[in-house]
Image: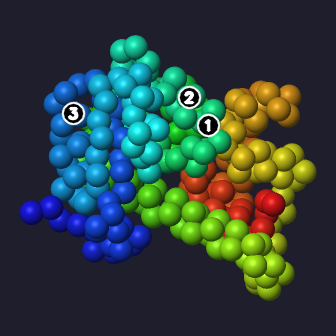
């Protein structure tokens, strides 16, 4: 019997499981991940390369992607580039699985817009915890966004309490945060602000530190909750 999560957002979605897209060219790994996630209560669609994964995006509208980096036809990096170019998928959580553990490889993945890097070999229980954490947070972001839209539609936006915070952000950090909230990757932000990707990464790291958040999705949620972005 599948064991559904007992807490968090997913506890209320037993009859409408969130969909996870798994892109992995190794059939054994792909089946293991898919079986584990299905037993955790998720709906899983799988692809053996990035090209197949892209073809599944519109038909299945996944809530999260788990993808290998090294795949035939279209690799994980190009898959992430494709996803982040689409405004509707700007906050879609992406987990990279890879045997490439060099710092330069991880930096490249984060710059393109992945949320978490898991080095192979990995434990399925760790992957499950990462997936649950990312989905809970993105669902909260969506809830907050819909709440704000509801206030605007009813003309009651002024009645929504504004959290009182005091975070000293530089003008450049504010620019980076605004573009990050629009779903731009670090490279796209750099092109827009005429900065190197490494400089953008430093600003993002500073934003994460100042807001005490741990990834892009959590940072955007924090910024929306505290009205750091419009």
Q: How is the image coloured?
A: rainbow
Q: Is residue 20 visible?
A: yes
Say what secondary structure mark 2 lies in.
Answer: helix
Q: Nearer the viewer, residue 130 or 38?
A: 38
Q: Which residue is mark 1?
A: 86
Tell me: residue 76, above or below residue 218.
above
Evaluate if marks 3 and 1 touch, with contact meaning CB atoms under 8 Å apart.
Answer: no
Evaluate if marks 2 and 3 touch, with contact meaning CB atoms under 8 Å apart.
Answer: no
- Give the residue drawn at x 18%, y 65%: 3
Q: Nearer the viewer, residue 114 or 54?
A: 54
In-image side of 81 versus 220 (left or right) = left
Task: Return the x and y of residue 78 as percentages of the image width and height.
Answer: 51, 23
Rounded to the nearest angstrom, the CA distance separating label 3 from label 1 is 28 Å
Task: Return the x and y of residue 193 as percentages of the image width and height.
Answer: 85, 34
Q: Nearer the viewer, residue 180 or 55?
A: 55
Say what secondary structure mark 1 lies in.
Answer: loop
Rounded to the nearest angstrom, the CA distance separating label 2 from label 1 is 7 Å
């Amino acid at each position: 019997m599948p064991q559904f999560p007992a807490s968090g957002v997913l506890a209320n979605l037993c009859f409408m499981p969130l969909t996870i897209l798994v892109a992995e060219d190794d059939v054994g790994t792909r089946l293991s991940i898919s079986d584990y996630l299905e037993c955790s209560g998720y709906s899983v669609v799988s692809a053996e390369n990035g090209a197949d994964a892209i073809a599944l995006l519109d038909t299945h509208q996944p809530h999260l992607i788990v993808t290998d980096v090294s795949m035939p036809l279209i690799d994980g990096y190009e898959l992430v580039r494709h996803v982040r170019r689409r405004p509707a998928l700007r906050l879609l959580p992406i987990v990279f699985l890879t045997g490439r553990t060099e710092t330069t490889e991880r930096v490249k993945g984060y710059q393109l817009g992945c949320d978490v890097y898991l080095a192979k070999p990995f434990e399925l229980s760790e992957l499950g915890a990462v997936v649950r954490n990312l989905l809970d947070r993105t669902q909260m972001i969506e809830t907050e966004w819909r709440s704000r839209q509801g206030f605007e539609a009813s003309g009651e936006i002024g009645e929504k309490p504004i959290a009182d915070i005091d975070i000293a952000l530089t003008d450049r950090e504010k620019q980076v945060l605004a573009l990050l909230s629009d779903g731009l990757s670090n490279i796209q932000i750099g092109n827009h602000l005429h900065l190197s990707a490494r400089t953008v990464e430093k600003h993002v790291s500073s934003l994460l530190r100042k807001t005490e958040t741990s990834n892009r999705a959590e940072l955007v949620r924090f910024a929306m909750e505290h009205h750091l972005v419009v």
